[in-house]
């Protein structure tokens, strides 16, 4: 059985307060199937009897940054290396990503098998996590000839719906997943919403404007950007002044 030490599922972390609904607002629980508001304290939808385990709870109207990671060409890679080595690669990959999530105050919503769905209260935390993942994966590839893993990362910011039990869903999640789909291994892509939040804090030469892109299943086009990260650990995605302020705020 896999453990947290070898990259397997760790104990479910406590949901952070910034992801929980504001208890003082008493947000209504809405049935995921018919949209009917369930009375406070009710265990079932008053219209169709669906259990509250199938309801959605608004996450306080907060704008979160949703990040997806994914191992590029995972099915083909599995076929190439065989099940035994593939399991080992996935465990090592999981350990790398989870360590970056923990260091940057993210919340692991769930594993997608060969990647993760993660929520962040701040866009800059998501960017720092993404850079950390890519640097660590890159460093491991340089040290080991048998490390063929390349990770894709995509993110988007907005409101999410919080399902009882900790899952999140909604347009923000869908968009983040589609942004991920545009990226390739070793790349970090993000939506214009994320770029607007942190774009001015990042050196201009680190941005690649990927233009307006159609995202499968979504209306219109989304303006996407790619962050050019670097292996130089002395480089921070943000300006020195902002990085110092962020460091100070996290140490309080």
Image (spheres, helix red, strand yellow):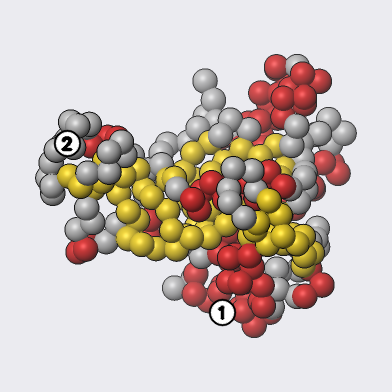
- Residue 33: x and y in percent read 30, 36
Marking on residue 47: 2
Q: Secondary structure at mark 2?
A: loop
Residue 84 seen from this side: yes
Percent x, y of residue 155: 60, 54
Quadrant location of residue 237? bottom right
**146 left or right, relative to 49:** right
Who's the residue at 22% across and 53% down the image? 28
In this rendering, the answer to whether 79 lies above or below 136 is above
209 and 102: which one is in front?
A: 209
Front: mark 2 or 1: 2
* 247 in relation to 96, above or below: below
- Precedes in sequence: disc 2 or disc 1: 2
The quarter of the picture where the C terminus appears is bottom left
Residue ID for mark 1? 245
User: Residue shown at 77%/18% (left/top)?
Assistant: 79
In this orientation, which residue lies closer to the viewer: 25 or 97? 25
Q: Residue at x 27, y 35 (%)?
A: 53
Q: Secondary structure at mark 1?
A: helix
Q: Position of residue 51 (x, y in %)?
A: 22, 32
User: Residue 45: which numbered mark, if any?
Assistant: none
Number of marks: 2
What residue sits 32% from the left and 60% below the top?
A: 60
């Amino acid at each position: 059985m896999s453990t947290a030490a070898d990259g397997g599922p760790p104990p479910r972390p406590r949901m952070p307060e910034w992801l929980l609904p504001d208890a003082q607002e008493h947000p209504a629980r809405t049935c995921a199937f018919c949209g009917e508001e369930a009375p406070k304290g009710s265990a079932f939808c008053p219209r169709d009897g669906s259990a509250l385990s199938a309801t959605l709870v608004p996450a306080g109207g907060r704008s979160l940054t949703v990040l997806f990671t994914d191992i590029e060409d995972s099915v083909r890679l599995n076929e190439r290396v065989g099940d035994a080595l593939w399991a080992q690669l996935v465990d090592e990959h999981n350990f790398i990503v989870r360590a970056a999530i923990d260091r940057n105050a993210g919340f692991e919503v769930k594993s997608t098998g060969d990647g993760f769905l993660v929520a962040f209260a701040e866009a800059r935390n998501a960017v720092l996590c993404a850079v950390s993942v890519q640097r660590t994966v890159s460093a491991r590839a340089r040290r080991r000839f048998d490390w063929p893993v390349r990770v894709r990362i995509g993110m988007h910011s907005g409101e999410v719906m919080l399902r009882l039990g900790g899952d999140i869903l909604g347009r923000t999640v869908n968009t983040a997943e589609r942004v991920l789909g545009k990226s390739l291994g070793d790349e970090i892509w993000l939506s214009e919403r994320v770029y607007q939040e942190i774009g001015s804090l990042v050196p201009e030469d680190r941005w690649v404007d990927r233009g307006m892109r159609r995202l499968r299943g979504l209306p219109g086009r989304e303006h996407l950007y790619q962050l050019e990260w670097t292996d130089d650990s002395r480089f921070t995605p943000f300006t020195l002044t902002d990085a110092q302020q962020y460091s100070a705020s996290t140490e309080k």
